[in-house]
Image (cartoon, rainbow, N blue to C red):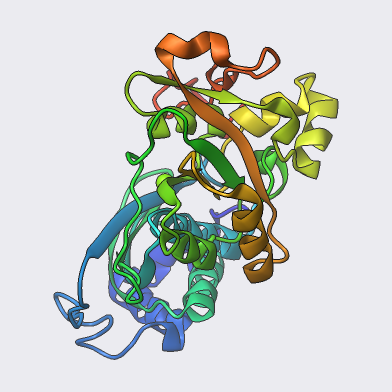
Amino acid sequence: MNPFTRIPAASIASLGERRVIAAIRGWLGPASPRSPFGLGDDCAVVPQSKGLQLVTVDPVIYGQHFDDDVSPAAAGAKLFKRNLSDIAAMGGIPRVAVVALAIDPSVSIRWLELFYRGIARVSRTYGVPIVGGDLAQISGGIAATLTLLGAASPRNQRILTRSGARAGDWICVTGSLGGSRRSHHWRFTPRLQEGEWLAGRPEVVAMMDVSDGLAKDLCLLTPPGAIARINPREIPLSRAACLASRSSGRSPMAHALGDGEDYELAFVIRNTTDFPAFSAAWKRKFPRVCLSQIGRFFKRSLVSSVPADWIDAESYGGFEHLKPVLRDRQRRP
Ligand SMILES: [Mg+2]
């Protein structure tokens, strides 16, 4: 759905700021608690949680993260879920969120309503209230930014970062990879339960979510003095990666490693891990989400010990955020 309208009475400009904010409260409904714990005061009041706190922020921008092919509800849901995925990536649990919106006055009321209903739905699904926000005017676009607060799991207070890996450790990934941007980049499920479970396992020593493509993201998990190498037979190619490859001329593997927006978890387990036992425990807990042991970190000096057919994921590239922008491009290539 195109967000903009030429009919003045259908645009948010016709409502004015105060009535737009009142409407947003209505669309959020029970997803936003009463002031001072929700919208309506200068700040939201959030009861303190015990232990470690997490904060993350991510936007969705019209033309970058969604376009007219994505429904407004799905764009709102994507905004929320990509932040939930970042909390999942640390093994945390999400608590409350605020939404800052910079928007052109010619956006239709209907579009904005559906966008917030999408946010409200995710809020209810994951039990994370919207406790505040901001509305600002820009010309010619929509940029919505959600800030999400979370906490370490009360069960173990353990947080996983990107930096716990050592040479010799194994690389694993949840779900399947590739083709997301063509088919399901707004429909993914943030791996919150999986992330919390993984943070509770002592074998798991580092984790992140795959947002820019495994090829690029894997570098962030690689310890100093080591290289990451992938066993191509173990990469869980998604159906979408195979479909995308038919029209793109790139291999399914290139899609799986380079596309980005998979929002799966990539994590590292110690080289001493009994993988069959670990995998069996995973299957009991998450029978519908596949788990793959896809590669390993090797000491740079021991590069000769890498199996001959294993590959360097980095050579497949990944999504680059700060590349030069073509003038009227509204979609990613
Ligand atoms: Mg992330």
Tell me residue 66's x, y (percent). 56, 47
Camera-side residue of 226 and 221: 226
Q: Using the rendered view, name the quadrant where residue 286 is placed.
A: bottom right
Left or right of 211 in this view: 58: left
Residue 103 seen in this snapshot: no
In percent of the image, x 71 and y 66: which residue is there? 287
Residue at the farthest left position:
42
Image quarter of the C terminus:
top right
Tell me residue 189's x, y (percent). 60, 61
Image quarter of the N terminus:
bottom right
Q: Is residue 181 above or below residue 100?
A: above
In percent of the image, x 48 and y 59: which residue is there? 198
Left or right of 50 in this view: 75: right
Camera-side residue of 22 and 54: 54
Q: Using the rendered view, name the quadrant where residue 278 is placed.
A: bottom right
Q: Is residue 233 above or below residue 78?
A: above
Left or right of 53 in this view: 32: right
In percent of the image, x 71 and y 35: which residue is there? 234
Tell me residue 104's x, y (percent). 40, 52
Camera-side residue of 134 and 304: 304
In percent of the image, x 68 and y 59: which residue is there? 289
